Image (spheres, grey):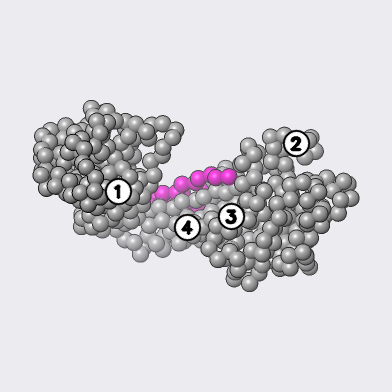
Amino acid sequence: MQAEIIAVGAELLTPYRQDTNSLFLTDRLNRMGIEVTRKTIVGDDRKQIAGTFAEALRRAELVISIGGLGPTEDDQTREAAAEALGRRLRRDEAVLREIQERFRRYGRAMAPVNERQALVPEGAEPLPNPNGTAPGLWIEADGRLLVLLPGPPRELMPMFLGQVEPRLRERAGDRRLLTRELRTTGLPEADVEQLIAPIYTRYEGVQTTLLAAPGEVQIHLRAWTRQPEQAARTLDELVERITLALGRHVFTTQGEALEEVVARLLNAHHATLALAESITGGLIAQRLTSIPGSSSYLVGGIVCYSNEVKTAWVGVPGELIRQKGAVSAEVALALAQQIRERSGAALGLGITGIAGPGGGTAEKPVGTVFVALSDGRRALERSAHFPGDRERIRWQASQLALDLIRRYFQFPAGQH
């Protein structure tokens, strides 16, 4: 079964509101083996909505609409569905009573405009909405299925999970979607593609997509199949071959964020960490503390933007800063060593750089980053020059730092 999703609402055509419902629906449909082939956003115009419904129903067996079921004049989804199917609207007295009862339970008077929500296209089956006044609608027509869902996620999600998904499972068939996700860091998208294209292009039954994000490249593998065991073996083989080709640049084959990988490694090795952050301004700590249980490995950190704080709070010698500059490998290493000693953590990490837009020089342009990790016996250091605006540079710097911690645990000394 193939499906299309149509999000209705003029607000979704502005920069102020995003359609997140379709992400939820796509995930749930894919899990059932229903492939989403198209997503469309249309404004609050009845004729445009009706035309969009009619076109989608010609292409797909299942069309799911989001939004436009409210009581106001700009809510035109019911009317558009009736027009697209050539059916009349009728008032469903049972639906109307349910809406009236909801208002009574909350001690509120129902405005006459809410009666519009009891209008139902002929042959449609209302879907009760315990979380709002807008019922959904299940409509079958000429072997096709049109499902109308309310827009608020707190109404849409339980309605879909409780009333729509169980019925779709009966129709979905035995086709299933299997996925794998690898993530890499330290290589640009073009380099990743060059290394793995000769591998994945030999697997005709697997869709491979590369997505570039600041500091990482994601590799998504998808296989639609009626033979899940065989497809799983194929995907696992492809993951293994890609991992071999990309080597230490692959930080996960499970689709995890880098901070999740680092948190797991710190816990597995019973290691603690302290941070001295300049350029990242606490971003590394924020990412690590977003993982539940972070107190087991993160001792704490200091945001040391000024030279005075680097010296007074962390203990970096002022003379070193004057000689080498605050943005230098030497200062990054001193930050790492000093924060480790002062905190008592097993590992200390120091990072410094120039996030911009100003402050760069010919020798150290905007985007220059130095990071160091110390365990008291040995130290690892890395430097980089990142393009982009201030926030992009800071994020990539945090990615560089987290990856240094990962490599400390995953690779022998000297192979980082």
Residue 150 in the image, given as x and y percentages of width and height: 27, 44
Quadrant where the C terminus sits is bottom right
Mark before the other along the chain sequence, 1 or 3: 1
Q: Which residue is mark 3?
A: 287
Residue matched to label 1: 156
Which of 276/73 is in front?
A: 73
- In the rendered structure, find residue 238 and report the number of the disc placed on it: 4
Q: Is residue 206 magenta?
A: yes
Please give the name of the residue rendered at 17% of the width and 46% of the height, measured from the top-left corner: 100
Give the distance between the C-alpha atoms of the residues marked 2 and 1, in whole angstroms: 49 Å
Gap in angstroms between the C-alphas marked 2 and 3 = 26 Å
Marks 2,1: beta carbons within 8 A: no
Q: Earlier in the sequence, mark 1 or mark 4?
A: 1
Label 2 and label 4: CA atoms lie apart by 45 Å
Of the residues tagged 2 and 1, which is closer to the observer?
Answer: 1
* Three-letter residue code for mark 1: Leu
Tell me if 236 is positioned left or right of 108 in this view. right
